[in-house]
Amino acid sequence: MDNIQVLEFVRSRVTQARFEHSKRVADMAVRLAKAHGFSEENAYLAGILHDICREYPGEKLLELAEQYQITVDEYERVWPIGLHGKVAAEELRTWGLDEEVLEAIRYHVSGYPGMGSLARILYLADKIEEGRSYPGVEELRLLALKDLDGALSDAIDHSLLYLIRRKLPIHPNTLACRNELLLKNVLPKGIK
């Protein structure tokens, strides 16, 4: 499938607003991939395809998770929209995409410890695409071009604070991902 066909496929699956978001995520993912020496083509595919199941109702996501034999955790059972990345990765499995593209799509919602480079890029691109406006996003965009893990850690912190302020649950994978980044990048340098 060429990029025009991929765009038309995505357009047929989501609302116009979600389509525009997906294009912005793809653009940001390409910028981050270029800045950090990763595949721009895979970054584009992960970005444009990441939300193809985002508008499915929760019941459908739970049904598809069962059909695809996706393990549904307690968090996803209560908030099934969190499954849209995992379901999308399974729906796209027959496309012959690189496994790193499927991994990035699968885990872009919560992140997880051990994420590969493209998964980190997509998670971050989704949080800092040009349509996002929240305090600190401009600084995150600049940092992301220089320090992928530092920006990822800061983006996760922003997400956690958002969820905490709204008294919403936090997926354990998000916390584990944050802790992994801190243990790898902060603690070896010493806590001040």
Image: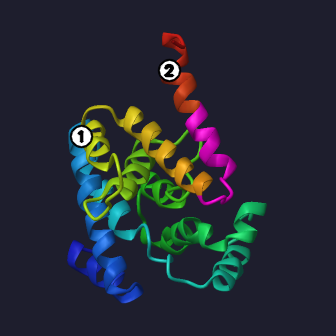
Residue position marked by numbered label 1 in the rendering:
142
Looking at the image, residue 107 lies above or below residue 158: below
Residue at the image point whose x is 23% and y is 72% from the top: 3
Residue at the image point whose x is 38% and y is 58% from the top: 126
Q: Which mark is residue 110?
A: none
Residue at the image point whose x is 32% and y is 71% from the top: 21
The reply to whether dot 2 and dot 1 touch (C-beta < 8 Å) is: no
Across and down, in percent, residue 168 comes to: 66, 60
Looking at the image, residue 64 lies above or below residue 183: below
> Circle 2 sits in a helix, a strand or a loop, which is it?
loop
In this view of the protein, which residue sits in the foreground, 143 or 135? 135
Residue at the image point whose x is 37% and y is 61% from the top: 46
Residue position marked by numbered label 2 in the rendering:
186
Judge whether residue 185 is colored magenta: no
* Amino acid type assigned to the residue bearing label 1 in the image: Leu
Q: Which stretch appears magenta?
A: 166-179
Tell whether 63 sits left or right of 10. right
